[in-house]
Image: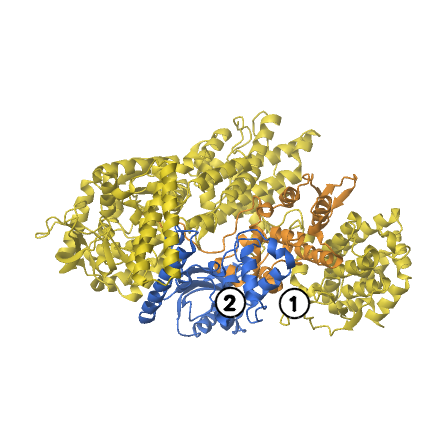
């Protein structure tokens, strides 16, 4: 999913106007123009900005501790998850996240936050490439992923990742 | 059939198993189902039931909000797996799921009746099962074994890999596939019985041949 | 709060400074360099970012492992209590620092100490970063600070200062060069005067030089390292594209080195032009194998006539085979693609019984239906026949008699189920019961849907007649058996050789060898049926062939219906390569039973060389798949209004080659809009429109420069990989190179900006012409490569390019088929965008059909034929219209009866009594369900099951 689409989905979810995204060529990062007429760059910054404008500010955390944890996961998403290009990278990221979610339903606090949404968007491309066996291996992370993708407002047009192997029909040739 | 007695260890275990891939008792948001099970539980599950504990802590965090969760309050026995048979029968075809559609709905007595029947069926099933073993679940796995460099003796590597023997593991064909710069990887097929051989273990075993093996990946995996 | 840090570490430095400035109440704990903090779990490896110090343990016992997040926490805790305001500028700097600055600085330093010298490329990139900081600081004294900070440094100052600290202060790292950034240096020194900074540096680095940070660089994190290197090489765009393009491929090693030699060869081939291309071979009739040519015989599993094909059939067999056959024709191989409907057997009889017509009428109806669906999908059969022909009878009987003569058949009496009520022997499919292997309780008499094993109907436990549900009795009947144990050794030899020399998919091999391993059992080849081929042996009058025996013979007989010289294809194994496509449940009949029968004749037959079996295709998410027989069917696909090419492309892109895959509407939309429209369509249209508008549809003169040659090399490599994958029948994977080529083309246009050049000097205009002429030629190549996947689109594109068939033969190199002066037609867009609302409507439409109750007759048909529900019981054909009054009445009765049962139970009445009343209640509920339109079969089916279990 391109970041443009991600912002669209996020804006949809937040109920704010879809941002007009362009690219900052020097640092290869997305940019938008804020309502103050300033340019704002970066996946994390723009996501936070959109959320801040919406009436769902609680997605950014309701106290400093939550907010800083959310910041940390947003950073993790851009610095690590987005950089997964090889299987070995992937395994490390998935192992870490699986561990984190061992005892938690969501990444921060006890509810859905921007951290979950952003990591879901970031992990989607990885999850669609996983085999059923791999998905089973990252049990906690898969449970979380399935939870988040069942919030229709978050998932929107992204394909559903199937977690249980259920055959639809039997081929009946011959 | 619910979780059985949630105050007993087996009840909590059933709950734990049930929650291993779920965040909530029903669906994808907190509901009265969570409240009912939570209230029945009284004490937090032991740490040896991580899934149940995770769920418990999560639901506990809602505090008084719990009583306002959406959904209908039902008896605790109404929640959880309706038919445990499906667990012991992998690859159950979807057609069978239709049997779960409860056309008799809403009436607790009849549910009980149905439950009783299911219990009987389950018992019969397990009796049969104990008499006659079910089909052995097997998987066919293709492993990619990568060497350190182009000087690694691939034949020796394959020989080493094939020395791994255990019950339920059968090695199949192998071939060399070029990677780049003259390096080749070994692609080897094996068939394992799921219950007896863990793929992780197998990978580790292969990686133990450090002189030859740089890494092992699963190239393909399928249930037979 | 505990703050765990490691000495000589830049991230730790950030947090110590922040703690100092904000006067935070933290206890700083020094951790040995290699240790990890037990942030989340004790067994996390040190290399994992989630446990790498600095780690701040928060009051809630959560942990922060990101230095920037720790600083953020410390600053906000001091400043605003719980009221956090969003400061976009600071956010942006923090993000830039973590995403851009820090990975470079660490990579740069690590690289320096590894090689003991400056890496020029890395150094200059680093300078760009410092330049960026410098220009910002020219217009402002420092990074944004919150009002609470007053004159103290802000969070931006802290994190950036810490990261640039070694490169600005350590002369080894080029601090000299840094001096030219005067604003940056001014800011750095001003900030550095702050006591908290001085103290923190002393604390973290002690007497050591800043470069000592090399020991604790997180460069050891391969992810970060990758990131910095790849960004620097311009390989990927870190944030803009979230790497969806980058294939996750472990074995992908970059081979970006292009040798002069390769370039020379590629360019020479390019110059050859189409006169060097082989002529497209003409279509002859009949197509027959030729001496000295590659003769390819392609078959796809014969669909059984009792159902409309669904997407799973289509992708698994006919469509896959079609793509391969089309590819072979484009390669000028002599190719014959044969398929048809399989019409004999019990299932047809069942279906005929159901619909109240003769088997022959059923076959006609469904043969036509299948044909139409495949036509719509543009399946290029050379001949689509059927098995109910004289040829079928002749060839099947011939093979059978030869087996008989060679003593591979033996007679045995069979105890067969006989239904006294229906007065007939029950064919396997007419019996339902419990599977003897897995105890699945809804197994058919010939095969268990659950474990997939073949069953003899008599082995079923608790058998019952499918038609009348009464329990059949065993009666004796004589039958002929194929002696598979006797044939096994020869079969094994042949299989080893065929698997070794051909492309058998893994699934196909695994299934086949698992059969051999278990040891083959004799198989009964005759049946007590009417609808089939008569057994040509005395004493067997009134019996017919078992469908598994005669169906694979259909390939031969259908070829015979196509040409009377069919033996040229089927009896010349040395000349012909046979590719058979199917889903995995058909494998044993193609790899074991049929080959064994052929081997038994001791005659020379063409036998399968390449057996291509796929896994299953699922539909949407798990929720839908619970209902029985749900999915998109061949006829539905047409009704969606989505072009058949898009369907083909989408299905092929999900072809379940090595594992199950799943169909999703949203994914279909995404693939159409991103790959077809934005990538492929956009490239082709862009190139051709440009030529139309600026060069009046004529290919201009092309002066190929070095950059173009590099492009030619890359296109050639993709072409090679396309051919390689196609030859191995990796049909899904072979799509990738096609789209890589159009992506390369798009990039070439993008980087050469012809739309600017075309308005410039003559030379520039010439350059624009070269680039776009080259792109038009790439479009021509794409038209060829895409043909197997999207034949209609390919035809449209060929018309726009105004090319002859000779331009579209696939050769191993890319050459110039559209020379200067070639005139193209006016281009039109090839694809349409799919709108989300449109897809949502379709999704709803198909979801609507998936309610438990299925009203439409066509849908009924599409649910699995073998199920008990397909036989309509008279008692269920009632209550199409039920008035509300009787509904209410029934509801009332149910409620009353429910109360009665409840009452009895609470009184602990006799078990038998309760049982009786419960039965009554169930019956009432059943009637209510019927009246309110629920599927009565499911009710009755369930009830029967319940009864049986008592």
User: Disc 1 marks which residue?
Assistant: C40
Secondary structure found at label 1: loop
List x then y, in percent, for residue C468: 22, 49
A55 or C585, nearer to the observer: A55
- CB contact under 8 Å: marks 2 and 1: no
State the blue chain.
Answer: B
Left or right: C279 with respect to C668? Answer: left
Tell me which chain appears yellow.
C
Name the residue located 60 percent from the left edge and 34 percent from the top edge: C772
Quarter of the rendering containing residue C359: top left
Name the residue beneath numbered marker 2.
B6
Is residue C577 in view?
no
| Colour displayed for chain A in the image of the structure | orange
Can residue C146 be seen here? The reply is: yes
B213 above or below A21? below
Give the quadrant of the C terminus of chain B.
Answer: bottom left
Toward the front, the furthest residue is C907
Q: Position of residue C666 (x, y in %)?
A: 52, 43
Image location of residue C276, percent across then percent down: 46, 38
Same chain, labels 2 and 1:
no
């Amino acid at each position: 999913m391109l970041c443009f689409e991600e912002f669209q989905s996020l804006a949809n979810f937040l109920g704010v106007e879809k941002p007009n995204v362009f690219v900052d060529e020097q640092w290869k990062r997305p940019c938008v123009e804020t309502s103050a007429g300033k340019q704002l760059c970066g996946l994390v910054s723009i996501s936070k900005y959109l959320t801040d404008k919406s009436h769902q500010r609680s997605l950014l955390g309701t106290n400093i501790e939550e907010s800083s944890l959310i910041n940390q996961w947003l950073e993790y998403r851009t610095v690590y998850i987005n950089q997964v290009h090889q299987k070995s990278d992937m395994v490390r990221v998935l192992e870490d996240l699986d561990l984190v979610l061992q005892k938690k339903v969501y990444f921060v606090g006890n509810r859905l936050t921007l951290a979950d949404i952003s990591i879901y968007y970031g992990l989607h491309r990885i999850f669609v490439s996983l085999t059923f066996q791999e998905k089973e291996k990252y049990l906690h992370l898969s449970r979380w992923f399935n939870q988040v993708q069942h919030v229709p407002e978050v998932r929107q047009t992204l394909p559903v990742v199937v977690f249980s192997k259920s055959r639809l029909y039997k081929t009946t040739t011959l | 059939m619910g979780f059985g007695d949630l105050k007993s260890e087996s009840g909590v275990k059933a709950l734990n198993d049930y929650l291993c891939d779920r965040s909530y008792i029903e669906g994808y948001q907190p509901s009265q189902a969570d409240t009912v099970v939570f209230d029945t539980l009284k004490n937090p599950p032991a740490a040896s039931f991580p899934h149940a504990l995770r769920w418990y802590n999560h639901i506990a965090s809602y505090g008084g909000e719990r009583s306002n969760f959406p959904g209908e309050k039902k008896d605790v026995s109404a929640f959880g797996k309706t038919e445990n048979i499906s667990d012991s029968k992998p690859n159950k075809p979807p057609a069978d799921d239709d049997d779960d559609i409860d056309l008799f709905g809403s009436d607790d007595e009849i549910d009980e009746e149905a439950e009783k029947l299911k219990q009987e069926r389950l018992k019969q099933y397990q009796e049969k099962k104990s008499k006659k073993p079910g089909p052995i679940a097997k998987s066919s796995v293709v492993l990619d074994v990568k060497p350190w460099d182009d000087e690694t003796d691939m034949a020796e590597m394959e020989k080493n890999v094939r020395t791994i023997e255990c019950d339920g593991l059968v090695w199949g064909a192998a071939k060399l596939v070029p990677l780049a710069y003259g390096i080749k990887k070994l692609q080897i097929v094996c068939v394992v019985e799921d219950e007896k051989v863990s793929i992780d273990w197998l990978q580790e075993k292969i990686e133990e041949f450090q002189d030859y093996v740089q890494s092992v990946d699963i190239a393909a995996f399928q249930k037979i | 709060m505990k703050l765990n840090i490691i000495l000589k570490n830049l991230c730790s430095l950030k947090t110590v400074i922040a703690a100092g400035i904000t006067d935070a109440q933290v206890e700083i704990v020094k951790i040995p360099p290699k240790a990890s903090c037990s942030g989340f779990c004790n067994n996390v490896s040190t290399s994992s970012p989630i446990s790498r110090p600095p780690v701040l343990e928060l009051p809630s016992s959560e942990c922060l492992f990101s230095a920037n997040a720790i600083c953020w926490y410390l600053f906000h805790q001091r400043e605003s209590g719980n009221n956090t305001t969003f400061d976009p500028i600071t956010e942006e700097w923090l993000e830039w620092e973590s995403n851009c600055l820090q990975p470079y600085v660490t990579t740069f330093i690590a690289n320096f100490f590894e090689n003991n010298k400056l890496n020029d490329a890395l150094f200059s990139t680093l300078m760009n970063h410092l330049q960026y900081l410098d220009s910002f600081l020219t217009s402002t004294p420092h990074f944004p600070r919150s009002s609470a900070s007053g004159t103290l440094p802000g969070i931006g100052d802290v994190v950036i200062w810490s990261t640039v600290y070694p490169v600005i202060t350590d002369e080894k790292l080029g601090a000299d060069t840094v001096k030219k950034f005067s604003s940056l240096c001014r800011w750095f020194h001003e900030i550095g005067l702050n006591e908290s900074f001085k103290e923190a540096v002393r604390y973290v680095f002690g007497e050591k030089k800043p470069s000592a940070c090399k020991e604790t660089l997180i460069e050891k994190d391969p992810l970060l390292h990758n990131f910095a290197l790849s960004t620097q090489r311009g390989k990927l765009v870190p944030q803009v594209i979230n790497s969806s393009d980058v294939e996750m491929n472990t074995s992908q090693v970059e081979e970006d080195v292009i040798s002069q030699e390769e370039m020379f060869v590629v360019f020479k081939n390019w110059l050859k032009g189409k006169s060097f291309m082989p002529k497209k071979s003409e279509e002859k009739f009949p197509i027959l194998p030729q001496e000295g040519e590659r003769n390819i015989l392609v078959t796809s599993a014969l669909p059984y006539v009792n159902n409309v094909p669904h997407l799973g059939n289509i992708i698994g067999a006919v469509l896959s085979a079609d793509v391969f056959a089309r590819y072979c024709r484009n390669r000028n191989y002599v190719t014959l693609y044969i398929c048809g409907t399989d019409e004999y057997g019990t299932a047809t009889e069942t279906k005929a019984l159901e619909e109240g017509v003769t088997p022959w009428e059923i076959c006609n109806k469904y043969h036509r239906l299948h044909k139409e669906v495949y036509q719509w999908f543009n399946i290029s059969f050379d001949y689509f026949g059927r098995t109910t022909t004289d040829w079928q009878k002749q060839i099947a009987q011939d093979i059978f008699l030869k087996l008989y003569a060679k003593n591979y058949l033996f007679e045995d009496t069979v105890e067969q189920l006989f239904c006294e009520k229906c007065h007939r022997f029950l064919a396997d499919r007419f019996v339902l019961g419990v599977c003897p292997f897995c105890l699945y309780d809804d197994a058919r008499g010939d095969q268990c849907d659950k474990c997939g094993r073949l069953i003899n109907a008599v082995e079923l436990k608790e058998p019952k007649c499918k038609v009348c549900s009464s329990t059949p009795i065993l009666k004796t009947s004589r039958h002929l058996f194929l002696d598979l144990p006797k044939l096994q050794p020869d079969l094994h030899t042949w299989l080893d050789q065929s698997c070794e020399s051909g492309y058998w998919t893994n699934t196909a091999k695994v299934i086949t060898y698992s059969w051999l391993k278990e040891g083959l059992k004799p198989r009964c080849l005759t049946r007590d049926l009417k609808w089939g081929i008569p057994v040509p042996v005395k004493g067997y009058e009134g019996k017919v062939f078992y469908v598994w025996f005669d169906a694979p013979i259909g390939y031969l007989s259908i070829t015979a219906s196509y040409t009377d010289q069919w033996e040229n294809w089927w009896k010349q194994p040395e000349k012909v390569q046979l590719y058979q496509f199917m889903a995995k449940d058909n494998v044993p009949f193609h790899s074991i039973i049929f080959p064994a029968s052929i081997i038994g004749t001791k005659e020379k037959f063409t036998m399968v060389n390449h057996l291509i079996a796929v896994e299953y295709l699922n539909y949407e998410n798990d929720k839908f798949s619970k209902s029985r027989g749900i999915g998109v069917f061949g006829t539905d696909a047409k009704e969606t209004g989505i072009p058949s090419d898009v369907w083909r492309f989408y299905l092929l892109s999900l072809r379940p080659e090595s594992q199950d895959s799943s169909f999703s509407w949203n994914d279909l939309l995404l693939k159409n809009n991103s790959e077809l429209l934005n990538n492929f369509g956009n490239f082709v249209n862009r190139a051709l429109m440009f030529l139309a508008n600026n060069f009046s549809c004529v290919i201009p003169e092309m002066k190929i420069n070095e950059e173009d040659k590099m492009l030619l090399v890359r296109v050639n490599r993709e072409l090679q990989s396309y051919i390689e994958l196609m030859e191995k029948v990796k049909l899904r994977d072979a799509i990738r190179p096609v789209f890589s080529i159009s992506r390369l083309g798009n990039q070439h246009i993008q980087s050469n900006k012809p739309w600017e050049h075309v308005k410039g000097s003559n030379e520039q205009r010439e350059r624009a012409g070269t680039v776009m002429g080259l792109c038009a030629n790439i479009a021509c190549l794409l038209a060829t490569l895409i043909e197997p996947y999207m034949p209609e689109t390919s035809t449209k594109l060929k018309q726009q390019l105004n090319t002859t068939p000779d331009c579209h033969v696939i050769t191993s190199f890319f050459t110039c088929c559209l020379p200067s002066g070639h005139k193209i037609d006016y281009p039109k867009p090839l694809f349409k965008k799919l709108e989300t609302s449109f897809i949502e409507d379709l999704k709803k439409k198909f979801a609507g059909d998936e309610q438990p109750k299925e009203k439409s007759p066509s849908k009924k048909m599409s649910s699995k034929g073998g199920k008990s529900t397909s036989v309509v019981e008279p008692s269920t054909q009632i209550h199409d219209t039920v008035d509300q009054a009787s509904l209410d009445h029934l509801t009332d009765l149910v409620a009353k009866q429910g109360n009665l049962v409840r009452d009895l139970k609470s009184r602990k009445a006799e078990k038998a009594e309760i049982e009786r009343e419960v039965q009554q209640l169930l019956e009432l509920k059943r009637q209510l369900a019927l009246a309110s339109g629920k599927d009565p079969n499911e009710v009755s089916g369930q009830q029967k099951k319940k009864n049986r279990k008592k």
